[in-house]
Structures are given as structure tokens and as C-alpha cells.
Image: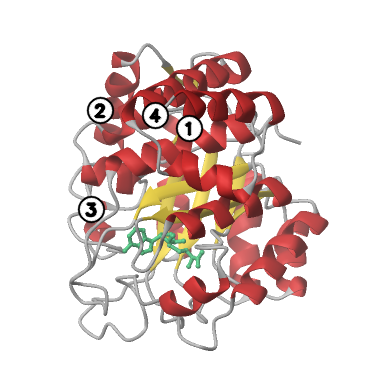
């Protein structure tokens, strides 16, 4: 047990560990886990104070040409009611969001061919023109270098593309053959080269994941050195091939958040909706474990239930204003404050 505490100290000092040391830390006991958490919280405070940034998530389409086995909006889910937001729907979400203090808009969706590069660029340009003080984050899946470049030139600031798992064999078990880890990683490298603030990330407790896969995720993240890392528990969706697998646990998700905070002290780390879904105080616990971002939904209430990546997703019935106020209270309950700011990463 003593040596485990030493591992946390080593991580704090050297900002990385060997693969076998990461595996030991991932499997650590509760005392070590609490020590890890307290240092991660301290590190968050040293780098970002008590500020928690908010991002307005606009889930603008649930059509998807990809077929990830874990995801509720995968192409093969024929019982998923599909929708697309119109240009004016999206602008309305931004208008409401801006009034509520959001200064980052995240456009997230399935890989929907209807949204050509021209259409995406039109949306980015309109948002940047109307709200020049806001950041635009894209989360549209894998695209060509040319597309990524065009979006950037139109004004997109950031791109979220979770790598999902950095272990090749594991990646193969979560995706059909034509979706590859190589291509996912290539996209992340291109995004960095172009100049985006980049976010990668992974699910905790996805089927067939072992501590070794998680250690590979950590080593990959250290090497990529992204500005953001999205980490949430896997949660089964009843209309996917993984419907009978268990969800990732709160404890392991929090532990992974803390390890990443210690590895990259200045990274932006969201307390995800998936974390809030597996525990009623999941977001608060995420913040106490080192997270410093929340990403509430700004999508119209009429479509929220249709963007169902996993079962029982929280906050699908509330208006944006309600979500914002509820989050503010939750954040204040753990001694932090929700801030009106773009909230750029200090990990540059
Ligand atoms: N199409 C975009 C956005 C994907 S949805 C893309 O490819 O990047 C955003 C994230 O939700 C995914 O990256 C995945 O990590 C997560 N997700 C999908 N299904 C999930 C599930 N069943 N449980 C938890 N998270 C899930």
C-alpha cells in the first residue's frame, strides 16, 4: 500500500509513469485513490482556481454513417428516430446560450453527409460573426485534412475527437473493421498540426477494456499532449450489440480523471453527462477529482431524447436555462463557481 502512495508522488513529480506503474495505479486501493483525488483537486486549483468553465453543447444531428458498437445513434440502429437541426434552430440555440452566459458553443453530431463542408462552414461563420467573443468547438467525427482545414479557416477554434481507446486490439472490438485506430489518431495529429485546440478521450469500462488498455490510453494522452481530455463511463444502450454489458464505474472514472489531471496539470477536463448519469452527484464528484469543465445541453428540448448515445441520459427534459441554474448550484456546492468566459486551455 505504501508503495502505491509513492506512485502517486512519482506521478506528481515526473508527470508520467511506466505502463506497468500505470496499471498498478489504475488497480490501486481506496487509500491511494483518495490521496490521488486530493492531489488532483489541489492541482486543479493551482492551475484554474475555483473556476469551472461551461460549454453549450448543440447536438445538431443524430444521423450517422458510422457503426460504433457502443453508440446508440450508430447507423445500424434502425429504431433510432433521426433528426437534424436547421441553420436557424442552431442559431437560436446560440442566442439562448449567449444570454445564459455561454461563451463556447460545441457543435456535436453523428457523421452526417447532409452537413457538407459548405453547410458546416456557413454555420461556423454565422456563429463567429454574431458572437465574435465566443469559441466554436466542433465534434463531428473523422474528416479529411481539407475539411478540417476549411472549418479552421472559417473560424472554428477547437475540435473534440475522442480516440475511444488507444489499444489497437481493443479498438477492433469496439468498431467495425473499416473504422481504425490509425485513422482516428491520424485525424488528431492533423487537427493539432492545423492549429486547433484539440480534445481526445475515452470511455471507462467499455466492453473488453482491461487496466492495460487504460494504461495505453494514458501513455497515448501523454504523448499527444492535448488541450482537453473527455473521459466518461461507458453506459450500455439497449439497441446496440453491447446492450448486455455493464456500465463503467464511478470510482474508476474518477480515478482516471485524477490521473489525467496529475499527468497534464493544465488540461481542460470535463465532468461529463455520462458521469452525471451513473451517479446523481457525478458532476460534483468529477470536479472534486480534478475536472474543471461542464458541458450542458443547449439543444432544443424537442430533440434531446433523440440524441441518445446511451440509456437513461440525464437532463433531457429540461430547458437550457434550467440546466444552467441547476449546474451552477451543483458547482457552488463543491466550493467552485461557474464562470462566463471562453475558457481556453492553459495547456499550450
Ligand atoms: N460523431 C462524433 C461525436 C461522437 S458522440 C465523433 O465521432 O467524435 C461523443 C462521444 O460519446 C463518443 O466519442 C463516445 O466516446 C461517447 N459515447 C458513445 N456511446 C457511448 C456510450 N454507450 N456510453 C458512453 N459514452 C458513449
Residue 80, x across and y down, in percent: 24, 77
Sequence-first tag of 1 and 3: 1
Q: Which residue is mark 2?
A: 326
Disc 2 beta carbon < 8 A from ligand 1? no
Label 4, secondary structure: give it. Answer: helix
The C terminus, quarter of image: top right
Ligand 1 - quadrant of the structure image? bottom left
Using the numbered discs, state the Cα–Cα distance from disc 1 to disc 3 in whole angstroms: 24 Å
Relative to 96, residue 90 above or below: below
In this rendering, the label closer to the viewer, 2 or 1 = 1
Q: Which residue is mark 4?
A: 33
Label 1, secondary structure: give it. Answer: helix
Foreground pick, 326 / 77: 77
Residue 332 falls in which quadrant of the image? Answer: top left
Q: Which residue is mark 1?
A: 258
Q: Residues within 10 Å of mark 3 (few under 14, many from 20)?
A: some
Foreground pick, 298 / 93: 298
Amino acid at each position: 500500500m505504501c508503495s502505491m502512495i509513492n506512485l502517486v508522488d512519482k506521478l506528481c513529480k515526473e508527470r508520467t509513469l511506466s505502463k506497468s506503474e500505470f496499471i498498478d495505479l489504475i488497480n490501486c486501493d481506496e487509500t491511494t485513490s483518495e490521496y490521488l483525488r486530493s492531489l488532483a483537486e489541489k492541482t486543479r486549483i493551482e492551475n484554474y482556481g475555483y473556476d469551472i468553465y461551461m460549454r453549450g453543447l448543440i447536438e445538431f444531428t443524430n444521423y450517422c454513417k458510422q457503426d460504433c458498437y457502443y453508440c446508440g445513434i450508430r447507423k445500424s440502429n434502425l429504431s433510432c428516430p433521426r433528426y437534424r437541426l436547421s441553420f436557424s434552430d442552431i442559431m437560436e440555440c446560440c442566442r439562448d446560450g449567449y444570454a445564459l452566459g455561454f461563451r463556447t458553443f460545441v457543435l456535436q453530431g453523428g457523421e452526417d453527409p447532409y452537413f457538407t463542408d459548405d453547410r458546416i462552414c456557413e454555420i461556423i461563420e454565422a456563429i463567429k460573426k454574431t458572437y465574435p467573443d465566443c469559441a466554436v468547438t466542433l465534434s463531428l467525427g473523422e474528416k479529411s485534412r481539407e475539411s478540417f482545414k476549411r472549418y479552421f479557416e472559417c473560424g472554428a477554434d477547437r475540435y473534440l475527437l475522442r480516440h475511444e481507446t488507444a489499444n489497437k486490439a481493443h479498438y477492433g472490438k469496439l468498431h467495425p473493421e473499416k473504422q481504425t485506430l490509425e485513422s482516428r489518431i491520424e485525424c488528431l495529429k492533423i487537427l493539432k498540426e492545423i492549429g486547433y485546440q484539440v480534445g481526445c478521450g475515452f470511455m471507462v469500462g467499455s466492453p473488453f477494456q482491461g487496466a492495460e488498455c487504460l494504461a495505453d490510453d494514458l501513455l497515448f494522452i501523454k504523448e499527444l499532449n492535448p488541450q482537453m481530455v473527455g473521459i466518461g463511463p461507458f453506459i450500455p444502450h439497449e439497441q446496440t450489440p453491447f446492450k448486455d454489458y455493464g456500465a463503467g464505474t464511478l470510482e474508476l472514472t474518477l480515478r482516471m480523471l485524477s490521473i489525467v489531471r496529475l499527468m497534464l496539470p493544465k488540461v481542460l477536463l470535463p465532468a461529463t453527462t455520462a458521469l452525471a448519469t451513473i451517479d446523481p452527484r457525478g458532476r460534483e464528484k468529477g470536479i472534486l477529482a480534478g475536472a474543471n469543465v461542464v458541458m450542458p445541453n443547449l439543444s432544443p428540448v424537442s430533440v434531446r431524447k433523440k440524441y441518445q448515445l446511451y440509456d437513461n441520459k440525464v437532463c433531457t427534459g429540461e430547458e437550457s436555462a434550467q440546466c444552467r441554474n441547476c449546474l451552477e448550484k451543483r458547482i457552488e456546492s463543491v466550493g467552485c463557481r461557474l464562470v462566463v468566459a471562453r475558457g481556453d486551455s492553459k495547456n499550450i
